[in-house]
C-alpha cells in the first residue's frame, strides 16, 4: 500500500470547514503487484462505520453514520516509490484530468 486519501467533498470540507460532508470517498493507492493490478471496478458497496461526529446524512436510509465509498487503484510504481510523488504523477499524467474536466458541473 502506498497511500490512503480522503477525496472529493469530504476532503474539501477537511480543508475549508465549510463545504459540508454528504459521504466519505476514500481511495487507497497500491504499488504494482506481480500477480496483477488492483481491480479498478471492484464491486464494493458503501460501508457504514457506525456513529460519526459528522452525524448521518438524511438521505442515507439504514446508515448509522456517513456512508463511506472505498476505492482503490494500483499504480505502476515499485513498493519503495515515494508515495506522494507517485500519486501526484498519476493524477497529473493519467486520464483523471480529462475525466474530471468532462464531467458536468452540479
Image (cartoon, grey):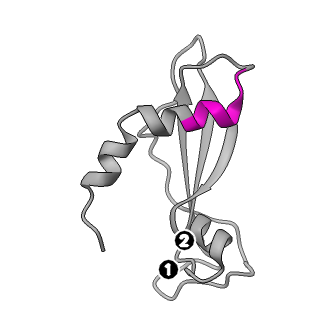
Q: Residues within 10 Å of mark 2 (few under 14, many from 20)?
A: some
The one nearer the camera, 62 or 87, is: 87
The numbered mark, 1 or 2, whose residue comes first in the sequence reads 2
The answer to if 86 sits in the magenta stretch is yes
**Residue 19 located left or right of residue 14:** left
* Image-quadrant location for residue 23: bottom right
Disc number at residue 60?
A: 1
Q: Nearer the viewer, mark 1 or mark 2?
A: 2
Q: Quadrant of residue 85?
A: top right
> In the image, 9: left or right of 31?
left
The image shows residue 55 at horizontal and vertical percentages of 66, 85
Q: Residue at x 60, y 17 (%)?
A: 33
Q: Quarter of the image containing the N terminus? A: top right
| Residue ID at (30%, 53%) | 101
Give SS at disc 2.
loop
Question: x and y percent of residue 66 in the render?
Answer: 61, 74
Residue numbers of the magenta segment: 81-88
Q: Quadrant of the C terminus?
A: bottom left
Give the class, few, some or many, for how many residues have Cα within 10 Å of label 1's Cα (few <14, many ≥20).
Answer: few
Residue 102 in the image: above or below residue 10 = above
Q: Main secondary structure of the magenta part?
A: helix
Q: Residue at x 70, y 22 (%)?
A: 81
Of helix, strand and loop, which one carries label 1?
loop
Residue 98 coordinates in the image, percent (x, y): 30, 44
Give the left or right position of residue 99, taking residue 36 as reference. left
Residue farthest along the bottom direction in this orientation:
58
Q: Which residue is mark 2?
A: 23
Question: Can you say whether 57 is above or below 106 in the image?
Answer: below
Q: Which is nearer the eye, 80 or 61?
A: 80
Amino acid at each position: 500500500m502506498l497511500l490512503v486519501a480522503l477525496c472529493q467533498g469530504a476532503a474539501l470540507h477537511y480543508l475549508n470547514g465549510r463545504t459540508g460532508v454528504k459521504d466519505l470517498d476514500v481511495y487507497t493507492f497500491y504499488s504494482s503487484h506481480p500477480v496483477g493490478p488492483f481491480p479498478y471496478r471492484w464491486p464494493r458497496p458503501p460501508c457504514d462505520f457506525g456513529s460519526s461526529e459528522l452525524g448521518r446524512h438524511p438521505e442515507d436510509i439504514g446508515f448509522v453514520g456517513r456512508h463511506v465509498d472505498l476505492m482503490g487503484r494500483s499504480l505502476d510504481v515499485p513498493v519503495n516509490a515515494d508515495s506522494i510523488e507517485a500519486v501526484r504523477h498519476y493524477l497529473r499524467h493519467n486520464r483523471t484530468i480529462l475525466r474530471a474536466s468532462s464531467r458536468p458541473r452540479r
